[in-house]
Amino acid sequence: MSIAAEGAIGPRSPAGSKRQHALHAKLAAIAAMDRAALMTEWQRMAGTATSKYLSTPFMRKALTYEAQCKALGGLPVSMRRALAAVAAGKSVDQAVRPSIQPGTHLVREWNGRTYQVEVRKDGYVLDGSTYKSLSAIARKITGVRWSGPRFFGLTDRRSVPPDADVASAQQQDSPPPIDEPDKAPCPVKSQLEALS
């Protein structure tokens, strides 16, 4: 299946349909470009000349991704942060693990009682007692083994029990609105400049 497969890009609205057709046309044009045309397009999109050592398939893939970023908004903020953390030397597990800042309060209702946990540098505090992990707190509350991050709603929303309630000072990450695709930052442009 090609990147520009029918129905694979954009919402099903008149504006989305126009944007989708424009993107399909752009991707088809990039796919048909020879090396000289790709170098010219690279100059236009990245604002700098390409290195003569970049392969035609690489330029085609990078330009295709850049066009998709401009049209659809690029990667979500959370993904860009995780990629930057991995590039800075963190392991993938450390980069994708949610970071809960000290001072954050997690709230969970269980069997008619509301539990509030304060996050501290040295652990988690519930009812004046300090615990090393959220899982220990979840076990204390429920009486059975349970993933603490899941119990407090810190993992993927689809896996959170329906009665979980999370109150936290963390900022929610979301992709840029599709109505303003040109304002969305695209990570490829800086990479294109670095390769030139």
Image (tube, rainbow, N blue to C red):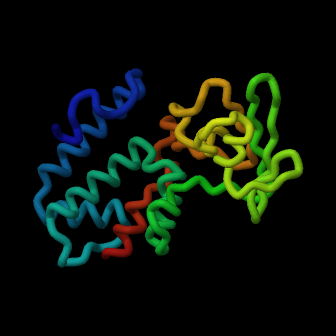
Q: Image quadrant of residue 55? A: bottom left
In this rendering, position of residue 90 left or right of residue 110: left
Where is residue 31? Give x, y as percent: 15, 50
Where is residue 48? Give x, y as percent: 34, 72
- Between residues 15 and 129, which one lies in front from this camera angle? 129
Q: Residue at x 44, y 56 (%)?
A: 186
In this rendering, position of residue 130 left or right of residue 134: right
In this rendering, position of residue 86 left or right of residue 194: right
Q: Image quadrant of residue 46? A: bottom left
Q: Which residue is situated farthest in the front direction here? A: 143
| Quarter of the image where the N terminus is located | top left
Q: Image quadrant of residue 22? A: top left
Is 123 drawn above or below residue 110 in the view shown?
below
Q: Residue at x 22, y 38 (%)?
A: 4
Where is residue 169? Give x, y as percent: 75, 48
Q: Residue at x 75, y 43 (%)?
A: 106
In this rendering, position of residue 112 left or right of residue 8: right
| Quarter of the image where the C terminus is located | bottom left
Is 57 drawn above or below residue 49 in the view shown?
above
Q: Residue at x 33, y 49 (%)?
A: 67
Total numbered labels placed on residues in the image: 0
